[in-house]
Amino acid sequence: MILERFYDNKLAQASYLIGCAATGEALVVDPNRDADEYIRVAESRGMRITHVTETHIHADFVSGSREMASRTGATMYLSDEGDQEWKYAFAEEDGAVLLKHGDSFKVGNILIEAVHTPGHTPEHLSFLVTDTAAADRPIGILSGDFVFVGDVGRPDLLEKAANAPGTMNAGAKTLFRSLQKFKQYPDYLQVFPGHGAGSSCGKGISSVPSSTVGYERMFNWAFSYTDEAEFVQAVLAGQPEPPKYFTQMKKINKEGPPVLGEFKQPRRLTEKRLERLLEKGKGALVIDTRVAADYATGHIPGTLNIPLNRAFNTWAGWLIPYDQDFYLVIDDSDTHGLDEAVKDLAMIGLDRIAGYFGTEVLSTWANAGHQLTTVPQITSSELAEQLRTGDVAVLDVRGRSEWEAGRLPGVANIPLGYLADRLDEFPRDKKLVVHCQGGARSAIAASLLRSRGFDNVINLGGGYADWEAAGNPTERAEQTAGNA
């Protein structure tokens, strides 16, 4: 048996290729949209991808199962568990094999057994893997978003992100029961999860790539609970805000992601086109992907800064609407920048890139007599002085749990992802300082506010971390405070 793990650092998402050396057949589990990387590795191993499956209808990235089946002719194997709301709408048309608990199939000599593990989602499957040429018992379980290293899949996403009211507590109870069954597996059984640290599908996932049932039973917090009610309270507490785009992902992955064939580069556009796009009232969305410091030094008014870094997928998914075209400004000094941006956006279904501009557009914009604008910065000591004079309003754009753990006195909290929906809560005639933990999210927030007509917005460089390190006063929120 051959096992290859693929990991997308930006999505914090793991997928797997399992192959039979004897027959050259291979299965891909939970692929993302970049089919080429799986095909390339399979071919390097002298294998062909004949099977593809996924553990559940994903909420955090566009599934690549349809893409893979289209490119390779592989048969899809999809869950048939859960109620009608959680069935794959495209399964019959695409000739997918539907799986219930206890169903199995073989990839050469490798036996794959489906285990229904609901809780994170109603249809969730895990897969026991047995190399029948060498053993009569499973070597491991592909646990998807059910059990992670050090954590378990959150059961609140259906209610918070997929607009399924009343499912949060029921999902937590179901998850508890699924975990009691998981506990019965032998200690040696290896656990191959679908996510690592940084994923919004859990609240404390380890960066360690794999584990064992025995280790998780001893050290995963979720297995320390024997009382269902106590577990429900614990698993729902402190979960991070689910990104807005999770709702869109569920819909895309249920109905059937479009098959791309390849990642297509958008057209390069000129400064004249940008000028027309940004004319008053046109409403075009232009994303400047340069690093925050460069954007703050000088940018074209009306553009939104989402730096092309590890968090690019997340904030693009939060802030770019799925129902309109948008444009990119790409740093020309990075020869792979455009390819990276296109791929990252496609991973979460943002395919409507109508064109892009190189960074030379900044100089041509200025040479044409237009003004570049800046994002002013402020230090924690300067902010402390201005707060004493009452000359400024402050907004904290961190996550709610961060705000509850410690905050500037009297400062309101609106997590960055919700900011665009609450712009009417801020005065436009007063100086507004935005801050996060270290300055990265607040830089995006400042660009968002300024692109929406807030002219007197300042970013707190160094964020709350610098404020606290300087010995400035802080306070804690009530632990019973509701989520924003």
Image (cartoon, grey):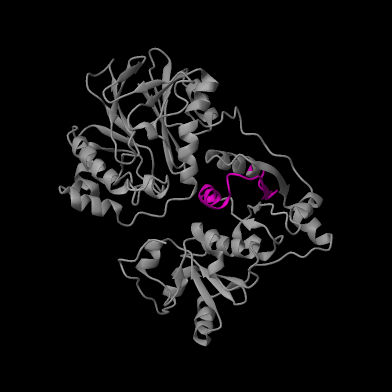
Residue 23, placed above or below residue 396: above
Q: Nearer the viewer, residue 292 or 327?
A: 327
Left or right of 276 on screen, residue 341: left
Q: Position of residue 167 (x, y in %)?
A: 32, 45
Q: Is residue 357 magenta?
A: no
Residue at image position (70%, 63%) is 298
Is 136 drawn above or below residue 325 in the view shown?
A: above
| Residue 71 position by quadrant | top right
Q: Is residue 237 rendered to the left or right of residue 314?
A: left
Give, as a single range, the part of the protein colored magenta: 310-336
Task: Determine if residue 62 is in view.
Answer: no
Q: Is residue 319 magenta?
A: yes
Residue furthest top in the image: 23
Q: Is residue 54 above or below residue 441?
A: above
Determine if residue 77 is in view.
yes
Q: Quadrant of residue 481?
A: bottom left
Given residues 253 and 162, the one toward you in this image is 162
- Quarter containing the N terminus: top left
Image quadrant assignment for residue 3 = top left
Q: Residue furthest right?
A: 368
Number of numbered markers: 0
x%, y% of residue 391? 56, 83
Quadrant for the C terminus, please.
bottom left
Coordinates of residue 337 in the picture (x, y in percent): 63, 45
Q: Residue at x 63, y 40 (%)?
A: 339
Q: Relative to 464, is 265 on the left or the right?
A: right
Spot occupied by residue 321 in the image (x, y as percentages of width and height) = 58, 48
Kindly give the residue lying farthest to the left in the view shown.
226
The residue at the point 30 percent across, 67 percent down is: 479
